Image (cartoon, coloured by chain):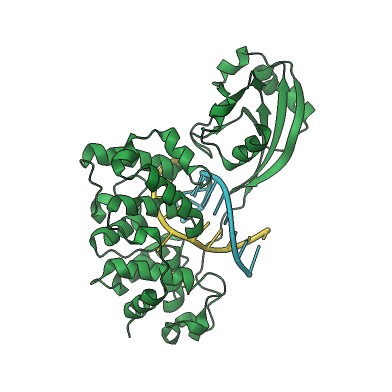
Chain colours: A green, B cyan, C yellow
Amino acid sequence: MIFSEEVINWYLKNKRDLPWRDTNDAYIIWLSEIIMQQTRVEQGMPYFNRFLENYPTVSHFASATEDEILKLWQGLGYYSRGRNMHYTANLVMDEHGGYFPTSYDKLIKLKGVGEYTAAAIASFSVGEAKAVVDGNVFRLLSRYFGVDIPINSTKGKKTFGELADEIMDREQPGIYNQAVMEFGALQCKPFNPDCPTCPLRPGCYAFRNRKVKELPVKLKQVASKDRYFYYFVVSKNNRLLVNKRGANDIWQNLYELPLFETSQAVSIEELLASPEVRSNFGDVLAKKITGPIKHVLSHQNLHATFIEIQDFEERFASKMNWQYVDYEEVRNLAQPKLIFSFLNKFLN
DNA sequence: AAGCCGGGGGA
DNA sequence: TCCCCAGGCTT
């Protein structure tokens, strides 16, 4: 039996019941695919349900504000996905008459939609024969065909993409694409793959050559950097001073507290004595509330300390574009997990 | 080509 | 700790 038949047979017997599999609505598929990028199914599922409930059509999605989208996205990470979706939903309304595109060539032009997502939407919605290559497929193909080119290299992406197109079932692209990904996720897992029960074992290069642990090959990632965040808690009349983050850094357009960052750990006394802090806060009394709290991102280690400020002079707030927000309204702002967790305790 | 962008879970 | 997850964008 050929590769694709074997994989599809396995899929029909072993597939999970996922809520986005029983539709051919390109909007709903787009919603699920963007949410699932670099995200485990169990983590993304509640977000998918929440988004579909709040925005049943692309028109509903486009009518929301970016702040509302980001609030629903809170805690899922990679927030550019939410921002790009909002942009794309509006573009679909304005330039596609509210009909979500279904062809690969149109999909690939949308912001936030790359080769994987375009292939997924096109094949699942209208059965276009484009092979998906996600982390699961890279791993499965690497092991089965014994390809040791790094999967995160330019050459690797090209090679695996061409291989995926060659071996796909062009008669039933949607089922096949679902099947290869599910096979990678459940059978040909990253660690301890279930080789003993694997129907592909007879033809698998990695199994026959004892290379399962060596494949796939991946270029090593860059080391994480340490950053030291000092968050200033300034409140007045049940209102909290907040800052909306800007471009060119983590957590774009999310809300946090007034922040001072250093490249290495400093004491609160040193912090308050620094010219930068003095020019934005003046003479203040400060008391540490909690920290340092370590918050790990995929590429940075944040060390956050929260400091309560008293005797803060109003005139400093406008200069930094900080705003006072009612305690009750702060809960409605999209915040990084780090800030949300802190405020959850601080505001009770 | 390499770096950047979250958060969580498993080993 | 390190690696991975239904990747894509920017430089």
Instruction: Tell me: residue A107, above or below residue A150.
Output: above
Left or right: A142 as drawn, with respect to A9: right
Instruction: Tell me: residue C11, above or below residue A216.
Output: above
| Residue A108 in view | no
Q: Quadrant of the N terminus of chain A?
A: bottom left
Q: Quadrant of residue A64?
A: top left
Pick whichever, A217 or A103, lies toward us.
Answer: A103
Q: Quadrant of the C terminus of chain A?
A: top right
Left or right: A91 as drawn, with respect to A190: left
| Residue A8 in view | yes
Left or right: A43 as drawn, with respect to A27: right
Q: How many marks overall?
A: 0
Question: Residue at (42%, 51%) from the top-left corner?
Answer: A48
Instruction: Tell me: residue A345, above or below residue A43.
Output: above
Pick whichever, B5 or A95, lies toward us.
Answer: A95
Question: Residue at (47%, 68%) from the top-left corner?
Answer: A185
Residue sitting farthest toward the left: A97
Pick whichever, A89 or A329, lies toward us.
Answer: A329
Pick whichever, A22 or A184, lies toward us.
Answer: A22
Q: Give percent across and percent down for residue A46.
A: 47, 52
Q: Give percent across and percent down for residue A9.
A: 35, 79
Q: Give percent across and percent down for residue A280.
A: 65, 19
Question: Residue at (30%, 37%) from the top-left corner?
Answer: A90
Question: Residue at (35%, 61%) from the top-left corner?
Answer: A21
Instruction: Tell me: residue C2, above or below residue A86.
Output: below
Left or right: A25 as drawn, with respect to A291: left
Q: Give percent across and percent down for residue A231.
A: 66, 31
